[in-house]
Image (cartoon, rainbow, N blue to C red):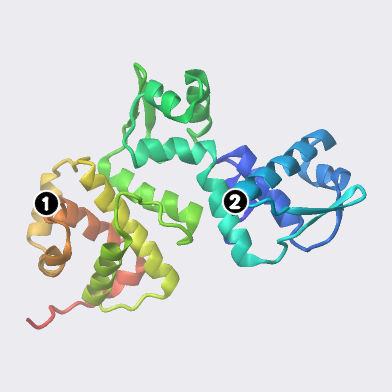
Amino acid sequence: MYIKALELKHYEKDVYLSVRVLELMDDGKLYKKSDLAERLKLDVRSVQRLLSELSKQYQRFTETDLPLFEKKGNSYRLIIAAQTMEENQFLVDLIRHSLAYRLLNLLIIENVRTIKELSDKLYRSESTIRRKLKELRKELSPLQLTIQRGEVLFQAPESVVRMYLSVYYWRLFRGKNWPFTLLQHEPIKKISREIQLFFQVELNPIKAQRLEYLVAAHLLREVQQHGLKKASNTQSALNDDPLFNDFARQLRPIMPVYFRKQAPLGNLFLHLLTREEYYRCLLYTSPSP
């Protein structure tokens, strides 16, 4: 599978355990519940619940009554073992339907801000929402998430939020899913190709997808009107930077109108320069008109 269970351990316990089961049983062999219990450090009853829940999730995912496990006596075999595409699609679905993902999606994509709204939309008690946010504190530490009078806020600088969101979604999906539902994917691909053209690089498919996530995170926050605070020193430096000025001239025509100002373009430009793919810009010569 495209992501290991260990990477989800501090994200959502149920997803972590589900993916761990899929990993253990991916060899197509028969496993007793007691064997799985020992490997997962759970009791047998918890393993039975986990297998049952996974089966329900798979039937919801496939919209059929197809079984996920074949049962022989007291042993189980994973039917989709070694079917990489099916496993990856199922994994994406498990993540997208997890409470942690839906909660953060409401905060990030739908701009929901209060504990009450989150409670109403997720059909969970307010205490459950608060507990889940507390569990996610470590995962969200770069965002400096706080709750003030029932309102959930990101206290981190906007430039940090934008970078973090691109990393967060990439870690979860690695290009297997387009999580930026407010943005059409094709225009983002066009912007990505233009950035590669400007920096005179041709990224492999995985790095190109990662660039699309980075661009989308920046555009998403801008369309939601989360503005960048003006940093006079940075703005002045960008004004005097011929590389940035050429970058802005080339990218502005294909950017959405709301992203053509210097501040968002400059922040995207600076984030690009943190990636080794674009180091060759240091040897940059201005392209011919």
Q: Nearer the viewer, residue 174 or 61?
A: 61
The amino acid type of the residue labelled 2 equals: Glu
Q: Is residue 44 left or right of residue 57?
A: right
Residue 65 at x, y percent in the picture: 68, 50
The residue carrying mark 1 is 235
Circles 2 and 1: CB atoms closer than 8 Å: no
Q: Secondary structure at mark 2?
A: loop
Q: Residues within 10 Å of mark 2 (few under 14, many from 20)?
A: few
Q: How far is disc 2 from disc 1 in space, using C-alphas?
A: 52 Å
**Quadrant position of the N terminus in the picture:** bottom right
**Quadrant position of the C terminus in the picture:** bottom left
Q: Is residue 93 left or right of residue 54?
A: left
* Residue 275 placement: quadrant: bottom left
Q: Residue at x 50, y 52 (%)?
A: 172
- Tell me if residue 37 comes above or below residue 27 in the rendering: above
Looking at the rendered structure, the number of numbered marks drawn on it comes to 2
Q: Residues within 10 Å of mark 1 (few under 14, many from 20)?
A: some
* Residue 215 placement: quadrant: bottom left
The amino acid type of the residue labelled 1 equals: Gln
The residue carrying mark 2 is 63
Q: Residue at x 85, y 44 (%)?
A: 33
- Tell me if residue 236 comes above or below residue 227 in the rendering: below
Q: Is residue 19 left or right of residue 103?
A: right
